[in-house]
C-alpha cells in the first residue's frame, strides 16, 4: 500500500472532531515528507481542517457547513500529546477549580514546556505559559501547589489566610517522598517567596523540611505577605510577615 493510500485510510478511521498532528500517522517516522504531502492533499480536499501549523482535525459537516473544532478539544490538545501530559491549567482557572475563588477567567492559562503564546478560540482565550519544571501526570499535583503558593496574594476574591489554609490540607495529604520532590521543585523552579511560604507551612505542620530549602533564602530578606503571626507562628522563622 502506498503512503498516500495508507494516510487516507488512517484519515478514514480518525475520530471526528479530534485534533492530531503528523505523528498520528504510523508512516511519519519513516517517510515524513510523503505523509506531510498526503495530509496537505487531505486539507485541500476538505477531508481535514487545519487548526494551526501541524495540527488538524476531521470535521463534522453540519447544515451550515463545517463544524469548528470545540474549545474543549483545543484545550485537551494543549494538555496532552500522543496520550502524554504536556501541560496543565494554572492561574485563575486553577484557583477556581480548587475552590479558592468563584471567578472564572475568560483566558485559561496553561503551563507548558514550550514557547509562550496566546490563542484566541472565539469563546475563550488560551495562554500557553512557558515553564521549565517537568510536566507529567505525577508532577502536576505538586506544581499546582507551588503555583498557588507563588500567587497566594493574587488569587481573586480570596485572602491569603484562606489560600494557605486550603493549601495546607493538600500538603498534609502528600506522602513523604512527594513532599521531598515538592521541595526540590521549589528549589529548582520557584522564587524565594514561594520557597519561604512552603517552608513555613511544612514547619507549621511538623513535616520534614530539606535543609537546602532554608539555606536557599537570604536571611536578610523579609517577605511581606500580610500573614497573621499569631495564627502562623512559624512565619517568624521564615521571615514572613
Image (cartoon, rainbow, N blue to C red):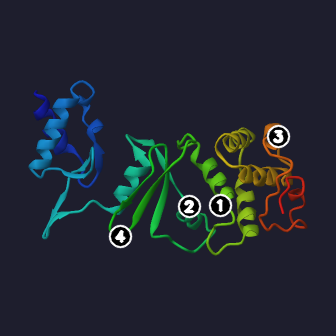
Could you tell which of marks 3 and 4 lies nearer the N-terminus?
A: 4
Report how far apart the C-alphas of labels 1 and 2 lie in the structure: 8 Å
Name the residue carrying label 3.
215
How packed mark 4 is, by other alpha carbons closer than 10 Å (few <14, some 14-19, many 20 or more), is: few
Q: Which mark is residue 151?
A: 1
Labelled pair 1, 2 in contact (Cβ < 8 Å): yes
Q: Determine whether 232 is above or below 34 in the image.
A: below
Q: Nearer the viewer, mark 3 or mark 4?
A: 3
Q: Determine whether 184 is above or below 63 in the image.
A: above
Labelled pair 2, 4 in contact (Cβ < 8 Å): no
Quarter that holds the N terminus: top left
Name the residue carrying label 4.
123
Labelled pair 4, 1 in contact (Cβ < 8 Å): no
Could you tell which of marks 2 and 4 lies nearer the N-terminus?
A: 2
Could you tell which of marks 1 and 2 lies nearer the N-terminus?
A: 2
Q: Looking at this view, is 154 or 222 the one in front?
A: 222
Report how far apart the C-alphas of labels 3 and 1 lie in the structure: 22 Å
Position of residue 16 measured from the top left corner of the image (x, y, whole percent) = 23, 53
User: Splitting the image into 4 quarters, where does residue 11 fall?
Assistant: top left
Q: Secondary structure at mark 2?
A: loop
Amino acid at each position: 500500500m502506498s503512503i498516500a493510500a495508507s494516510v487516507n485510510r488512517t484519515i478514514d478511521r480518525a475520530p471526528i472532531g479530534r485534533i492530531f498532528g503528523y505523528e498520528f500517522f504510523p508512516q511519519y517516522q519513516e517517510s515524513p515528507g510523503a505523509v506531510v504531502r498526503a495530509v496537505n492533499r487531505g486539507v485541500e480536499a476538505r477531508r481535514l481542517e487545519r487548526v494551526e501549523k501541524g495540527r488538524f482535525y476531521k470535521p463534522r459537516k453540519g447544515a451550515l457547513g463545517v463544524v469548528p473544532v470545540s474549545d474543549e478539544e483545543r484545550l485537551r490538545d494543549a494538555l496532552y500529546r500522543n496520550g502524554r501530559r504536556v501541560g496543565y491549567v494554572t492561574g485563575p482557572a486553577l484557583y477556581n477549580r480548587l475552590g479558592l475563588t468563584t471567578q472564572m477567567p475568560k483566558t485559561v492559562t496553561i503551563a507548558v514546556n514550550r514557547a509562550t503564546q496566546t490563542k484566541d478560540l472565539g469563546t475563550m482565550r488560551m495562554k500557553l505559559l512557558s515553564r521549565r519544571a517537568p510536566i507529567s501526570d505525577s508532577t502536576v499535583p505538586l506544581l499546582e501547589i507551588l503555583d498557588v503558593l507563588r500567587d497566594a496574594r493574587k488569587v481573586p476574591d480570596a485572602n491569603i489566610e484562606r489560600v494557605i489554609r486550603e493549601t495546607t490540607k493538600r500538603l498534609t495529604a502528600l506522602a513523604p517522598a512527594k513532599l521531598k520532590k515538592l521541595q526540590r521543585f521549589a528549589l529548582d523552579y520557584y522564587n524565594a517567596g514561594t520557597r519561604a511560604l512552603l517552608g513555613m507551612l511544612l514547619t507549621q505542620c511538623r513535616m520534614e523540611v530539606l535543609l537546602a530549602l532554608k539555606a536557599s533564602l537570604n536571611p536578610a530578606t523579609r517577605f511581606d505577605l500580610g500573614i497573621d503571626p499569631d495564627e502562623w507562628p512559624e512565619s517568624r522563622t521564615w521571615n514572613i510577615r
